[in-house]
Amino acid sequence: MEQTVAVIKPDAVGTKDEIIDRIHESGFRIAAQKETNLTRELAEEFYAEHKGKEYYDDLVEHMTSGPTYIMVLSREDAVQGWRQVIGPTDPEKAKEENPDSLRAAYGKNILQNAVHGSSTAEHADVTVKKIFGDLKFA
Ligand code: ATP
């Protein structure tokens, strides 16, 4: 069983229940969940690899603009499976390439794109420790 981290970003927290329905329909178990307002420090660290990009400040601003809903999802092939469910980064591209995806349905634009998914299992582990501490999940 693999774990990944899903974040419902501030722009989509209002549709949290619909997104959680999709999570369950897609075969994931929610092993942990937490609503939290990310601090600037945590948002900067979370997206550290984007530092220097022209959208970095807007990204940190957006991620700290309101509550986020952070979940640990458990399933076979969770990392790739969840990225498939959320779709491409840009909602416009998502509508063309993966119209059933969450970003196609709920994303407003490439910055406010509704959800995050870990890119690797290692990245997921680091984020889980940071957000949920050293808890172990079944
Ligand atoms: P995430 O890490 O949020 O799951 P991703 O892996 O699909 O997204 P990345 O390229 O890692 O995409 O970008 C991280 C986030 O930065 C995106 O989800 C989006 O919010 C923002 N972003 C990426 N590219 C742009 C851009 N060109 N303009 C504005 N924001 C962007």
Image (tube, rainbow, N blue to C red):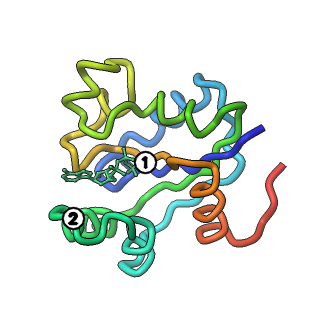
Q: Judge by depth and name the residue closer to the eye, 129 or 119.
A: 119
Residue that label 2 marks: 53
- Please tell me whether residue 121 is drawn above or below residue 67 in the rendered image: above
Tell me residue 28's x, y (percent): 65, 33
Q: Is residue 78 left or right of residue 20?
A: right
Residue kind at label 2, given as amino acid type: Lys
Q: Hey, which residue is sitting farthest left in the picture? A: 54
Expressed as whole percent of the image width and height from the top left, the position of residue 7 reads: 47, 51
- Mark 1 residue's CB less than 8 Å from ligand 1: yes
* Amino acid at circle 1: His
Given residues 97 and 69, the one toward you in this image is 97
Mark in the foreground, 2 or 1: 2
Q: Which mark is residue 129?
A: none
Asked whether mark 2 and ligand 1 are closer than 8 Å, the reply comes as: yes
Residue, x 66% and y 32% (percent of image)?
Answer: 77
Based on the displayed image, in which of its 4 quarters is residue 55 positioned? bottom left
Residue that badge 1 annotates: 116
Q: On screen, 54 above or below 97?
A: below
